[in-house]
Amino acid sequence: MSNLATFNPSKVPAFARNNVLSDNARALAGSATVGGGKRVSIRGGVFRLMVNGEEIAKNENRSMNIVIVNGGAKVARSFFAGKYVAGETSQPDCWSNDGDRPDASIEEPQHTSCEGCSQNIKGSGQGDSRACRFQQRLAVLLAEDIDGDVYQLTLPSKSIFGRGDVDKMPFQQYAKYVGAQGKSIGTLVTEMSMDSDSDTPKLTFKPLKYLTKEQWLVAKEKGESPAAKSAVTQTPATTDGVKPKAPAIPKVEAEAVDEPVKRTAKKNAEPAPKKEFADVLSKWTTDDE
């Protein structure tokens, strides 16, 4: 039986039936592009709970139940100049929370805007892909531990875009589906599942049931917490405690200097005039070679 039955108005709890869509729920439902050191990783197609970069538990089941309490209203972007190393989390060389322009913290952005960046062109990455990756960050609770910690969940592009059937929807389709019925995604227990037909980790989503009013009140409060806000604005590397990359220091090569030649001092020779410090510095270049 389809889980669509959970949206029958006669079965909707009163708090959810009267609950006006939050700004966050509206953004998630209507977006066309759309902390605390804890996150859920899907590396290798396995659900892994990470705390400060260390894996503390993993769930090899194909599905996991969560409550989505906050999320980025727009799709984020991340660019890595180097090659991917399995199991390693590193800071992006350039990234954006809104998908419009590089974050203000980037020392050497790839471009002034994401739209005009060469890393945003198809084919700039592997095959026909873009070198700058799409991501969407969510703040979630584990459904079996709603009173517990907030976790960051970062969705790759395959988990965000596209279309599926009602039991296997990518995130944007799922958020729009819930929002189109005037319901808030934060009032539901959501099942996220690994797509077994995908060659890389890909999540799909579907609604399972409504929260109780008591659970919803807890989830609502946690969605407004600093941990939830950090989860939707920080990169996964920042959540893991990885320090930002230091800007590259230009290499400056010294000018070639002839080997010193020993000279025989002349008797009664006039002493050489003393060179000023500024004259010495003027012979050295500070330009990159």
Image (cartoon, helix red, strand yellow):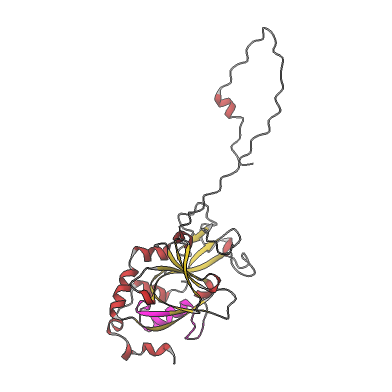
Answer with left or right where residue 256 lies relative to residue 110: right
Q: Residue 43 at what x, y percent from top left?
A: 53, 69
Residue lying at the far top of the rendered structure: 268
Q: Residue 209 at what x, y percent from top left?
A: 37, 84
Residue lying at the far bottom of the rendered structure: 1
User: Magenta residues?
Assistant: 163-190
Q: Residue at x 54, y 74 (%)?
A: 45
Q: Work out whether residue 88 can be spotted.
A: yes
Magenta span includes 175:
yes
Quadrant of the rendered image containing residue 39: bottom left
Answer with left or right where residue 69 lies relative to residue 255: left
Quadrant of the frame with the N terminus? bottom left
Q: Residue at x 59, y 26 (%)?
A: 280
Residue 57 position (above or below residue 94): below
Q: Residue at x 56, y 45 (%)?
A: 249
Magenta span includes 167:
yes
In front: 264, or 183?
Answer: 264
Q: Residue 191 at what x, y percent from top left?
A: 44, 80
Quadrant of the rendered image containing residue 79: bottom right
In front: 222, or 179?
Answer: 222
